[in-house]
Image (tube, rainbow, N blue to C red):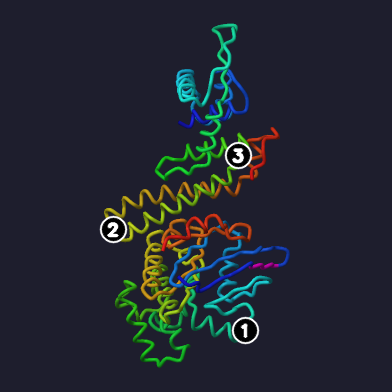
Amino acid sequence: MTVIVEGVGLRKRFGLTEALRGADLAVRAGEVVAVMGPSGSGKSTLLHCLAGILRPDAGMVAFDGRRVDTMSDRQRTQLRRGAFGFVFQFGQLIPELTAVENVATPLLLAGQRRRTAIGAARAWFDRLGLSGLDGRLPGELSGGQAQRVAVARALVGRPRVVFADEPTGALDTAAGDDVMDLLVTSAHAQDTAAIVVTHEPRVAAFADRTVLVQDGLVDADEDAQLGVTR
Amino acid sequence: MTVSYALLTLLEQSERHGYDLKRAYDERFDGGRELTFGALYRALSQLVKGGQATMVAVEPGAGPERKRYAITDAGVTDLQRWLGEPEDPRPQLQTVLFMKVMLALMSGRPAKTYLRAQRSHHVARMRELTTRRRAAASAAALRLDYELFHIEADLRWIDHAQSRLAEITADVRGGSGAGEDR
C-alpha cells in the first residue's frame, strides 16, 4: 500500500527541551496507527508535525508525495481543511451550534451549500448511535456522545488522514470503546488513514498497528515487528 | 519454573552449595515465599538431569556432606533463551515477568530488549482480542474484556518497569560491576 503521510528525521525543540530527536514514521493510505509512549515522549509533537500544525526544526514531512514542512502557511491551512481531519481530547465542538451543524462545519468551510452539508451530516447520526439527537447542543450531550460527534465532524469530508490526540482521554472505558469503534470502522469504510495518539493500551489495540515513541524517537523495533498487520 | 532459572542465574555467577543457593534466593526474592529445601533439591536434580547444571564436588561439612553445583554450557544457553523470550499473555503472569527482569539484570543481560519484546507480544495479543471483541455478542465480549484488562495491567507494569529501568538496574546490580544493560 502507498504511503500517505511520512515524517523523516523529525526534530523539534521547545526551549531547552528536545521533543523530537530524529523521529521517523510512515503511515499507509487507509491505515490506522496508534502512537503510544510515556508522557513527554514527544508523541503529540510528532502528531502536530505530521499534521502541519507545527513546523519541525529539521527533517521533512510529506503528504501524498508533497512536502508539507516547506509549504506556506496558507497552503498548509488549505491542506488541513481539505485533506485532514482532527479529533482532540475534548471534542472542541462549537457550543452555539447544534450537533448536526457541528458535523456539517467542514463541508460548509469547503464551500458546500448549507442544505447539502446538513443533509450529509445528518446521515451520520444513525451510524453514531445518536438518532434523534442531531438537534441537540453540545452541552446537552454526554462526553461520549459529544466525542462521537467530533469523530463524525473529522470524517464527514472524507479526508485522507485523521489526526486524533488522546481522543478517549476524558472518557470511561465503555464510552472510549464506542468512540474508537466508530473511528476505526468509519476510517476503514472510507479508506481514511488515522493516526491516534494515546497512552492507553486498550485504545491502541483498536489500531492496525502500534508504534512506541520514546525520548523523541519512534521505537523502530516495535514498528518493524508490528508493521505487517494489514 | 522460575525457581530453576533463578538457580541457573545464581550458578552462572559462581559455583554454589545448595544452602548458598537457598540463602541467595531468599535474600533476593524476599517478597515471595521462602524456598524450601524440598523445592530447592527437586529443582536442582531436575537441572542436573536436564544437563543444565552439574555437581562438581562433594565436600564434607559440619553436618551432612555438601554438594557443590555449577552451570553447564547448555544451562547458559537455556537461560539466555528463556530470558529473551516473551511470555504468552495470560492472567497472573506477573511473577514470571518480574523474574525475567530481575534475572536479566542480575546476570548482566539486556532487560530492556526483553521488555520491548514482551511489550510487542502483549500489544499484538490485545489487538487480536479487540478485533474478536468488536465482532462478539455482549456476553462473549465481557469474557474477552476480562482478558483484555489483565493484559493491559501487565502492559502498564511493563511500561512502568521500562521507565524505571535505570534505577532498578542500579538497585539490583548494586555496584557489583556486572555488564551494562544494552
Disc 3 is attached to a residue of which chain? B
Disc 2 is attached to a residue of which chain? B
Residue shown at 58%/48% (left/top)?
B162
Q: Which residue is mark 1?
A: A73
The answer to whether B107 is drawn above or below residue B132 in the figure is above
Measured in 3D between alpha carbons, the distance from the residue under mark 2 to the one under mark 1, in whole angstroms, is 46 Å
Question: Residue B109, labelled with which disc?
Answer: 3
Measured in 3D between alpha carbons, the distance from the residue under mark 3 to the one under mark 2, in whole angstroms, is 42 Å
Callout 3, which amino acid?
Answer: Arg
Helix, strand or loop under label 1: helix
Image location (x, y in percent) of residue B73 = 56, 29
Task: Give the mark nearer the N terminus: 3 vs 2.
Answer: 3
Residue A139 seen from this side: no
Which secondary structure class fits the magenta region best? strand
Q: Nearer the viewer, residue B60 or B34?
A: B60
Residue shown at 39%/63% (left/top)?
A175
Residue extending farthest to the bottom is A113
Measured in 3D between alpha carbons, the distance from the residue under mark 3 to the one under mark 1, in whole angstroms, is 50 Å
Q: Which segment is the magenta one?
A: A10-14
Callout 2, which amino acid?
Answer: Ala
User: Do the residues bearing badges 2 and 1 touch, measured as CB atoms within 8 Å?
Assistant: no
Image location (x, y in percent) of residue B51 = 49, 25
| Magenta stretch encompasses residue A84 | no
Q: Quarter holding the N terminus of chain B?
A: top left
For label 3, the crowd category at 10 Å Cα-Cα, with few meaning under 14, some 14 to 19 and many 20 or more, is many
Helix, strand or loop under label 3: loop
Residues marked 2 and 1, same chain: no
For label 1, the crowd category at 10 Å Cα-Cα, with few meaning under 14, some 14 to 19 and many 20 or more, is some
Callout 1, which amino acid?
Answer: Asp
Question: Residue B136, labelled with which disc?
Answer: 2
**Residue A112 falls left or right of residue B54:** left
- Foreground label between 3 and 1: 3
